[in-house]
Image (spheres, rainbow, N blue to C red):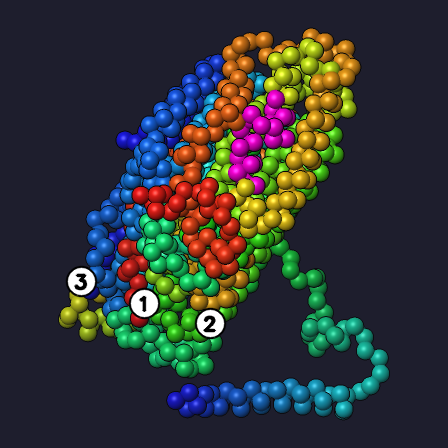
Amino acid sequence: MNAILTMPEMAVTALALGLLVLDLWTPADRKGDLGIAAIGGLALILAGSFLFGAGAPQYAFGGMYVLDGMALFFKRLMLGVGVVALAAALEYSKRFAAGTAEYCALILLAVSGMMWAASANHWALLFVSVELMTVTFYVLVSFERTRMPSLEAGVKYLILGALASAFLVYGVALVFGGTGTLGFAGDSGPGLGTGSVLVRVGLALVLAGLGFKIGMVPCQFWAPDVYQGAPAPTAALLAAGSKAAGFALLLRVLLEAAPDWALEMRPVLMLIAGASILYGNLCAIPQRNLKRLLGYSSIAHAGYMLLGIVVLERAGAAAILFYLAGYACAVLAAFLVAALAFDPGEPEEIPALAGLHRRSPYLAAALALSMISLAGIPPLVGFFGKFLLLKGVVLAAFDSRSFGWLAGVALAGIVTSFYYYFGVVRAIYWSAPAAERPPIAVSRVAGAALGACLVGIVAAGVFPSPLLEAARLAAGALRIP
Amino acid sequence: MVEQQIWQYAPVLILLLVALGLIGGMLAASAALGPRGRRPPIKDSAYECGMLPVQPGGGRFAVKFHRVAMLFILFDIAVVFLYPWAVVYREMLAGQAPAVLGGVLVFVGVLLVGYLHAVRKGAFDWRG
Amino acid sequence: MSILTVILLLPLLALAALAAWPSRQRVMFQAVTIGITFVELVLASLAAWQFDVSAAQSFQFVQKVPWIPSLGISFHVGVDGLSVGLVWMATLVSFAAACASWEIRERVKTFHLLLLLMNAGVLGAFASLDLFFFYIFHELALVPTFLMIGIWGRGGQRSYAAFKITLYLGLGSMVLLLGLLAVFFLAGQTTFDMVELAAQARQSPFPVARQQAVFPLLLLGFGILASLWPFHTWAPLAYGAAPTPTAMLHAGALKKFGLYGLLRVALPLVPDGARDWMSVLAWLALGNLLFCGLVAVRQKELDRLIGYSSVAHMGFIFLGIASGTALGITGAAVVMVAHGMLAALSFGLSGHLYQQTRTLELDRLGGLLRPMPFLGTALVMAMLAACGVPGFGNFPGELLVFFGSWPPRPAATAIAAAAALVVGAVYALRAVRKALHGPLPDAWQAADDLSNPWRRLPFVLLLAGLIGLGCFPGPLVDRIQPAAAAIARPLESAPAPAALIPLPAAALTRPPEEASR
């Protein structure tokens, strides 16, 4: 039994518990130090995760848990996302009456849930890790108890999340009923066949449950409301972390556990991808709220990433991993600015960004870069991610006309998205502000976290090679039969 | 194999049919045999045959009831997990002593953190 | 390190250095930008001088650095006879644009950072020999254009114009990206290197059916970027709303990217797909020449008029490309260089005019030749160049285009030659009459005629370039012709159009065995 493999997850959990205990004896004016300690601890775990080499897959708990290149890639991504989300939380929690340490501890628990998900090789671990993540998010979303939108978002996420969990667990039960085993493929034999009706229905339900996590059509209705209402750090973690965990599980289920079924369902997946791209981009056009806009755009990005799944190849998986890392950098930067640039209680309206370039040139440039990267304009990382995803689709289009249509839909979606992303840039740089507002002071921690995101956006866009190699290595670990 | 599995559920189906038949039969019988004429609103209330309701439901309760109920359920359910552990404890002690003991220590440790947190934050303070 | 790499790195390094500079010292930013673009111009002139004409169809000043080995992407720069002139023209236009940034008074730092970024993008697009970088460098200019038009643009429509150009060019770039990816797959997914791809396409042409599927994507993508009729509507609007330096750089240099891409990527790599589309392209080119020319005649504002005339000039270039002959392609490339200077000159002059008069409505202007003799003269010369008067750079190019495209497409060429030149003369002379002649409104008696000699310098240089090219087109044509012949060879070897090529064109082109030496 290789319990040592689970060290990173265990360490994150221990950090969360330790934080809760320390909080009990920390005076109120020193709570900020706890947040700093959490950031430092998580960064340390991130550094420690590089002690694990990406060699042959290693298993723990009787094959329930797998540590391979892909799991490691996702864990590092989630730890990085966690560090930035904690920095945002530290800044944002000044608005809460109390509960800085609890908020940070919950973020850590959510991160540990995502990390377990990255290593799930068993339907039970899949469900438990998803629940650890989701239940934590119920609290994180509604953490601003005194603000109605946050509560509304919390209730919506609770109801729809519970529905998705029900789908997921029912699907798992049906798959178990059809196959008699709870393990994924790999060490426990060949992938699931497509024969049994029970298994097919079960897998469809699992797809719906995971589709909720990644926010794909038709499980996307929660995204805009929850992104808008949730505290900005929570929304950042939802967009960058929860989505990544959903894709980690989706890759394992579709490519490793049930490749035959995925091949059979390819037309449906293509339809879902195209619909997500169109729905997200078209609905984002009239939005005035920055976080709501990011919510709709997150649906579109889920659609882009599904393009990497429908090709059902390692190259597509590598493209998804690359895209997720780039998306995380951009969307974390955007939510950090959303946390910093608005007054407490003020809705995050895009017109209110007018004059931001004067109030804080740093935040203005950061938000503009993030939007441009999300729009996918070179030389930023968002472009290279889209380049990789489109590469797979164009290759497939040579053999099948329907992929040509899908490429056309993606193209239309991307061009549509220019409109609203550039709308934010316009608001920042040349819309006339309604009233002169004071400059914004950016704290050192938040500034550094934002800087890390910006370096990621630019560096991984101009020199994509290292990240691309890491993604290819990670996708190489997928056991595609 | 699938057919066999599904036939195992036949008793459930029978129970379902019986339940539906019973309800339908009672409703039909009451419609056929019962008295006809005026139906006062009281007839349609939830407890037609009991006390009159004194106030509308859905009133407000102090949140501390909720808190205590939640904590009770949390610790209660958590302790339930110790039963299966106790059942296999003796057999596993022979081969996998560190796992079986360490596992439960971690489990109880996490519970303890929760308990400490609840105490220090005053969750058990009835007046708070 | 190749001289081209130095030219590319200069603006990027300056950009990084200036970004850290405090924004209060305004003069500093302009001084650095002008200095950097001047050094680029000197280096590019040096490169054009050292360029070995006897090996003009092979790439010179080459540098190759592997960038993303797993995808076969490398930073690869180099110029052949086709691009050396374009790179030189782009540096000249960049220098002129940097000089014209006097008119920017607020947020000077941001403007110059964006200008340097755009400058790097323009030069990189013409110097890159790797499809990936070729595309990326062009896209570098997209965001600066958006911001420059939005922040420093003029007129009430600037926001609309900024969005229109961004969305249009974004659409073009995305279509183009799909096309380039398709080319990458046709060549077996091994490399994005244009030189290797071209060699592969020469030795074993890609399947014809695939080529026919890919070429429309490339044509549409490049066509939108180069304002091919009917996808041209972004150009006059955006150039009218843009600040002067942006309009000069975009209309002069950046818009040539689409045309250059057709010549560098589309024709050499998918010639069999291109052949069927050439007649379509020729008729669309007539759309540019006639439709946009007639629209230019009816414009009420000078900058719109220049914008439409610039779109109309693209028609000559498209016609030259559509001819598929070495002569026509040479002509198209000459017009590209000449029009770059002409567009920069016209937009620079109209920008200065706007600074003085605060309006460019032709009905309100008039008599400006008297207070502004220098500017007026330069504008007259620019307009004469625009209608193709001999002695200016456009004339030899347009002539070569007509010679080249007469054999395969006599009808289109005849219409273009007869009608377009007349239409061109009408709008050019109308602009001169309305703006420069007639009674002078009192308000502009004391209009400033570029009194500072330093500010005359960029216009003098551009005019000198135009006249020099018009009187001595030899050096440029000698450089372009071998490269153009190499591009035209697979097109001419085709069964159907090749049979139509009569003697004159073949006699004017160098014999293939000499060109390939």
The residue identified by callout 2 is A265
Q: Which element carries disc 1, helix, strand or loop? A: loop
- Eyeballing the image, is A386 above or below C165? below
Mark with earlier residue (2, 1): 2
Q: Main secondary structure of the magenta part?
A: helix
Residue at left offset 47%, top offset 29%: C473
User: Given the image, on which type of amino acid does mark 3 rest?
Assistant: Pro
Q: Which residues are magenta?
A: C381-402
Q: Is residue B28 among what the camera can see?
A: yes
Task: Specify the subunit that label 2 lies on.
Answer: A
In the image, what residue occupies the spot 37% across and 78% down?
A: A193
Per the image, is C386 magenta?
Answer: yes
In terms of secondary structure, where does tag 3 sit? helix
- Is there one chain holding both mark 3 and mark 1? no
Q: Which quadrant of the figure has residue A356?
A: top right
**Circle 2: residue type:** Met
